Image: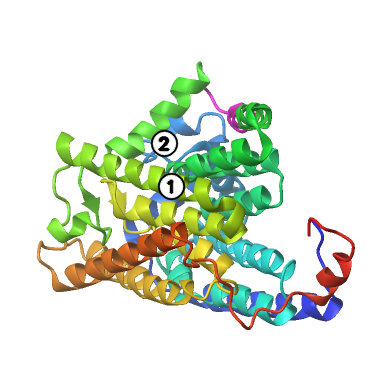
Amino acid sequence: MRLPFERREIISLAEMLLLSFLIRVALFAVAGYKNDMGTFEAWFGAAANYGIRPFYQVVSWHSGYPPFNVYLFWLFGSLAKSLSLYGTPYIAYLIKLPSTIFDLATAFLIFIFVRRKLDFKLSFMASELYAFNPATIFNGAVFGQYDAIYTFFLILSLVLILDSKPTLSAVAFTFAVLTKPQSIALAPLLIFLIVKKHGWKKLATSIIATAATVMIVIIPFQWNNPVTFLLDIYSVGYGAYPFTTMNAFNTWALGGMWQPDTQASFLIGWIMFGALTGFTLYILYKRLDVSGEMLILFSAFILFFGFFMLPTRIHERYLFPALSALALMFPFVKKVKPIYGALIFTYLVNQAYVLYFLNNDMFIQSGDPVVLIVSLINLIVFLYALRLMFRDLRGQGLTQTQPSQRPSKSLLEGSKGNADH
């Protein structure tokens, strides 16, 4: 990629990211979810002591965490072992470090994406708003969760597909799925874009690259059949929580937390998400040539948000990628600003409220006013986002850019004589 950086820009960006890192490290001391922190410590220790190959055989509970996570468990677990951190309060710092690194990498990626189109000030602002986003900071630095890792690969996949690198985009997406299975929400969009912009042959190439990436990642593990190996891992996580919502303040939360996920509710949830996917791809098909990149990013946001709102068995943390997609659009699309602000608020409240109940071994009761209010806000924002998509289908300007948008001078100079640009 062309990176029109100047030395002062690199220094300013590094200082900002360093400040964000230090704030997060300061929050590492705040207790996360005690059960998950203890589980992560056990996984770190198992990977460090036994290695990657037998990991799934030696741990008694892995909650469906896919193989790429094990590499991180081994790397940081080995570091913790060399520093004798196991059994000390400082192990929490190392457990929370991987997600922090990847989240700041996402902030850097946002800067690169925006900087190739706009001036430094707007690019820095977009990255800064994400780097200091209290909801995403809370997820990794306080809660101690790993949602920032697969989100980084999803955002990288989007940036690469927009840069006409479908094969690399498929590889990045594969790493996302090999980190968290909910990444699959982006698959329909990527397949559509590869076929639409590059043809079926490139889709076949991307599928081959995906298969090769999967094999490279899982070769060190102990397995007889790669398909059943992965399906068993994913089914453990999905089958472990047969409830309509696991503390996610979404559509199902309006009917109460931890309600049994019957066959009917299961089918209704996935039918709704399937309908949303079809609606999104139809609008993209009709309007791609007009609305371009921003409609692609907004479509990704809709799929991420819809995956949080509609299917059953969703955790409170699954809204994370939607915020990252909004951050990419923030300097370009004025109408995403209120959405971004609202979801930062609801996501932060959702996580903080749930963490309090989890650490006190309590269940949130049906009819809880905080759950109802925040879930209703999420539903209103979701319907508003769908309305924006529908308005774009009618040519009413979802992707209208802000008046303050100022293209980068270096990019303008580089585009002279380039009709495609």
Where in the figure is residue 134, as x and y percent of width and height? 45, 76
Q: Read off the magenta span.
A: 214-222
Task: Quadrant for the N terminus, please.
Answer: bottom right
- Tell me which label, 1 or 2, sits earlier in the chain: 1
Q: Which of 75 and 214 is in front in this view?
A: 214
Q: In which quarter of the image is the C terminus?
A: bottom right
Q: Residue 116 carries which label?
A: none
Q: Position of residue 93 (x, y in %)?
A: 52, 65
Residue 312 as seen in the image, left or right of residue 150:
left
Q: Can residue 47 be seen in this view?
A: no
Residue drawn at the location 61% of the way across and 33% of the way down: 217
Q: What residue lies at 43% left-to-right and 47% top-to-bottom?
A: 42
Mark 2 lies on a secondary structure that is loop
- Seen in the picture, residue 232 relative to 128 is either above or below; the reply is above
For residue 99, side relative to residue 197 (left or right) = left
Circle number at residue 42:
1
Do the residues bearing badges 1 and 2 touch, measured as CB atoms within 8 Å? yes
Check disc 1 and give the amino acid type.
Ala
Q: Position of residue 298 (x, y in %)?
A: 50, 59
Residue in the image at 73% along x and 78% along y: 120
Three-letter amino acid code at the position of disc 2: Val
Label disc, if present, on residue 59 of the rendered structure: 2
In front here: 126 or 411? 411
